[in-house]
Amino acid sequence: MPSDKLHLSLGPVLFYWTRDHYVDFYREAADWPVDIVTLGETVCSRRRDMKLDDWLGIGRELAQSGKQVVLASQTLIESEADLRDLRKLCDNGDFIVEANDQSALQRLSSARLPFIAGAALNLYNPATLGVLARTGMQRWQAPVEMSRDDLTRLIADCRQAGVNQPCEVFAYGHLPLAWSSRCFTARRHQKPKDRCQFVCQQYPEGLALRSQESKEVFTLNGIQTLSGACQDLRHELSAMTEMGVSVARLSPRAEGMPEVVQAFHQARSGELPAPDPLALVDAELCDGYWYGRPGMDNSRTQTG
């Protein structure tokens, strides 16, 4: 992957869609100006509409369209069945795997397989990144709460330490904040987790959790908690390139994603429409973490 160009990546779908929705989405994504597409279920093992073979089939079609394909591992491993599925994923033989927990990291590194280090691994220092680089890491993702200034220093320190693997930044979408063994969406419907009846599929962009002031504070997605607002760092793509970021990740949404991808594609080419192109889809936007502020802040609405 050339280091002088900012690449766009499409992250894994975080929400639970129908099988037809996944197929239609990725058939359309094959023609989008993204360089990397990450596939797979990263949130809940009970979401079984798509099997590994289904993801591999979609991946092969995307690869034929010129995309670099990555298979993402589950972030929270809770059972032996989860471990069996993880072993099959890591041993898929076709595509590089994004490791999102220590189980995947151990499996891939011990097998001497190349891997992508996911943001959930919480990589904050060049020493850790150096160890992972020596065990097969090909690219790493910055923690979603890391500020621009901290990331600039980390990339510089990595280069000084001889760690030159590309860095990827979560540039658009609801920010993944936390995972739990409890399913919040099932609880909302007064159902036990193991008999949830897959109610999260009713919310293709998650279930909004509002404050008493009706502000969307979080988005509930089964066992995962996301930010209420969508992070949008489109105006920071030029700065990312200068600081050494190689990939900007766009997290899929159920509606309006072609427009999001096109806007970021134009932005990386220096074509930012005026006066304010941020309202791509019907959602509040945020960029607070990037500027070292509370994550829900939006710099374009701040006066001081």
Image: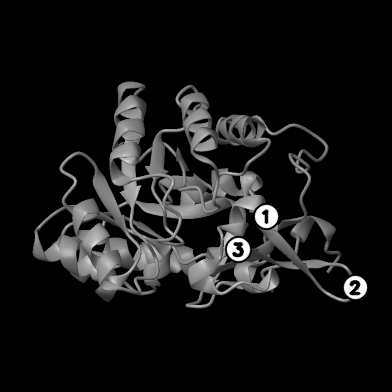
The residue pinned by badge 3 equals 290
The residue pinned by badge 1 equals 230
Q: Is residue 105 above or below residue 68?
A: below
Mark 2 surroundings: few (<14), some (14-19) or many (≥20) residues within 10 A: few
Q: Secondary structure at mark 3?
A: helix
Q: Nearer the viewer, mark 3 or mark 1?
A: 1
Name which of mark 3 and mark 1 comes first in the sequence: 1
Residue at mark 3 to residue at mark 2: CA–CA distance:
25 Å
Name which of mark 2 and mark 1 comes first in the sequence: 2
Which kind of residue does numbered mark 3 sit on?
Trp
Which residue in the rendered view is the most extreme toward the left? 111
Mark 3 surroundings: few (<14), some (14-19) or many (≥20) residues within 10 A: many
Residue at mark 3 to residue at mark 1: CA–CA distance:
13 Å
Q: Is residue 161 visible?
A: no
Q: Secondary structure at mark 2?
A: loop
Give coordinates of residue 257: x percent, y percent.
62, 36
Which kind of residue does numbered mark 2 sit on?
Glu
